[in-house]
Image: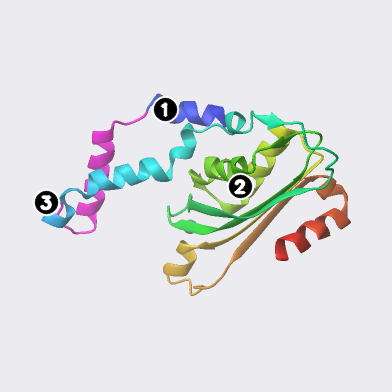
């Protein structure tokens, strides 16, 4: 992941160049970039891109670096459901929007619950596929938290499917990734799915 960031920041075009690129697209579709309503659009689009793709400058390790070991006798899974996912597909830059459900079985250490939604943001705010997003969230938890098990499910609607005449306005894509206990033990997986559906 780090390597990719370096490449991005290495030969990075300037903001003015990015705005010019948006202006070129506006001209390409046959619009007049000098029209009043459109004149500021390149600036706005680049600002929006800064926001959509801020994940490239965020680091999962940093977000998961603060852990707590005082969990009493608690030895069950920690599940956070319905974490908002807003990402963009790498094929069309169209949004895909939905929810993530993340569970892990701590091995003595837990993270603040809000960290899980921030972790989703780190990877969602990049050009993505839902499959990779799911895998990256699970891998980051395994790497930085070293839990006994991790389960990630994402349910999302892809606007490139909804809008591009594919005719699947209501299709929901579901992806899962299991590690550790959840990978080894079908009963653990079933527990996770039951808790997600409850
Ligand atoms: Zn797409």
- Which tag, 1 or 3, sits closer to the chain's start? 1
Q: What residue is shown with label 2?
A: 132
The secondary structure type at the circle numbered 3 is loop
Label 3 beta carbon within 8 A of ligand 1 = no
Q: Is residue 117 left or right of residue 187?
A: left
Task: Examine the image and state in which quarter residue 19 appears.
Answer: top left
At x 54% / y 27%, what residue is drawn?
3
Q: CA distance from mark 1 to mark 3?
A: 31 Å
Q: Which mark is residue 35?
A: none
Give the mark nearest the N terminus, 3 or 2: 3
The magenta stretch is: 12-33
- Mark 2 and mark 1: Cα distance apart in space: 22 Å
Q: Are marks 2 and 1 in contact (CB under 8 Å)?
A: no
User: Which residue, given by chain and number where applicable, does mark 1 sit on?
Assistant: 9
> Regarding mark 1 in the picture, which secondary structure is present there?
helix
Circle number at residue 34:
3
């Amino acid at each position: 992941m780090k390597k990719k960031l370096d490449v991005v920041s290495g030969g990075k075009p300037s903001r003015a160049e990015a705005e010019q690129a948006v202006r070129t697209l506006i001209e390409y579709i046959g619009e007049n970039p000098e029209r009043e309503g459109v004149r500021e659009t390149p600036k706005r689009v680049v600002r929006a891109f800064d926001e959509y793709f801020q994940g490239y400058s965020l680091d999962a390790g940093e977000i998961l670096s603060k852990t707590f070991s005082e969990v009493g006798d608690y030895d069950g899974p920690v599940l956070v459901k319905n974490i908002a996912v807003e990402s963009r597909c790498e094929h069309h830059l169209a949004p895909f929007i939905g929810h993530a459900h993340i569970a892990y079985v701590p091995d003595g250490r837990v993270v603040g619950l809000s960290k899980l939604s921030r972790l989703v943001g780190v990877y969602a705010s990049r050009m993505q596929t839902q499959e990779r997003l799911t895998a990256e969230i699970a891998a980051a938890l395994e790497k930085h938290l070293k839990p006994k098990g991790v389960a990630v499910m994402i349910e999302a609607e892809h606007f490139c499917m909804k809008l591009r005449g594919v005719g699947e306005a209501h299709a929901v894509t579901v992806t899962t990734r299991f590690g550790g206990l959840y990978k080894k033990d079908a009963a653990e997986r079933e527990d996770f799915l039951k808790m997600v559906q409850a």
